[in-house]
Amino acid sequence: MFVIGVDPGLAVCGYAVVEKTTGGERAVTAGVIRTQAGQPVASRLAELYQDLSAIVREQAPDVMAIEQVFTNRNLVTAVSVGRASGVALLVAAQADIPVHEYTPSAVKAAVAGYGKATKDQIRYIVASRLKLAVHPEPADAADALAIALCHLQGGVGMAHLEQAGTAQ
């Protein structure tokens, strides 16, 4: 099974494809799509769409796992992440692949066993689990790997636990 993990963002969108094999999980590819801050939002979204569509066509994932948009203190950031998330969802729909959304704390709980794990802890665990020689960089690519791993280890169950208030 191939899972594409997406950490949506307008400026930087992380993506990763992880394969589940009989021997465990294997990172196929990971990286980021960057858009230029000075460009119109519509142009940036079109660029994100084209690049993410190309990755999906090339990698042919079976499923997309994406981080759910959440509102923290910065509404402007939440809106731009929401726009990028919408583009990723459209790419998945057009490729006819199912999508599963996970909150950041559900991803952390699934991967690290603790819903408030730090970014450095997540990078370390992701590198260890996928037997990577170096910690994944940048953080958005590491997050996308973690999102894919969350799904592969039954993240759907983690999301339900979190909604019930039992995950940390």
Image: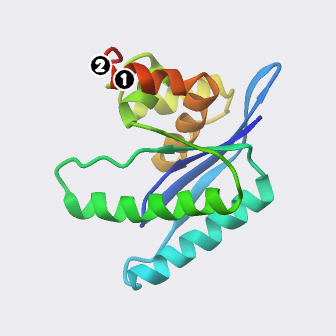
At x 29% / y 57%, what residue is drawn? 78
Three-letter code, disc 2: Gly
Classify 113 as above or below 94: above
At x 48% / y 83%, what residue is drawn? 43
At x 30% / y 46%, what residue is drawn? 70
Three-letter code, disc 1: Glu
Classify 27 as above or below 137: above
| Most distant residue in the left direction | 73
Q: Judging from the image, what secondary structure is the residue with disc 1 in? A: helix
Count how many numbered circles sit on residues in the image.
Answer: 2
| Residue 39 percent across, percent down from the top left | 41, 85
Please indicate whether residue 117 sits to the left or right of residue 85 in the image: left
Mark 1 = which residue?
Answer: 162
Between 141 and 59, the one lying in front of the other is 59
Whole-number angstrom distance, CA of label 2 to CA of label 1? 5 Å
Q: Judging from the image, what secondary structure is the residue with disc 2 in? A: loop
Disc marking residue 165: 2
Please indicate whether residue 140 sits to the left or right of residue 165 in the image: right
Between 36 and 100, the one lying in front of the other is 100
Evaluate if marks 2 and 1 touch, with contact meaning CB atoms under 8 Å apart. yes
Query: Picture quarter containing residue 57?
Result: bottom right
| Residue 139 percent across, percent down from the top left | 46, 46
At x 69% / y 50%, what residue is drawn? 97
Q: Around disc 1, counting alpha carbons within 10 Å, would you say few (fewer than 14), some (14 to 19), or many (20 or more)?
A: some
Is residue 121 visible to us here?
no
Q: Quadrant of the C terminus?
A: top left
Between 127 and 90, the one lying in front of the other is 90
| Residue 125 percent across, percent down from the top left | 53, 24
| Residue 55 percent across, percent down from the top left | 70, 60
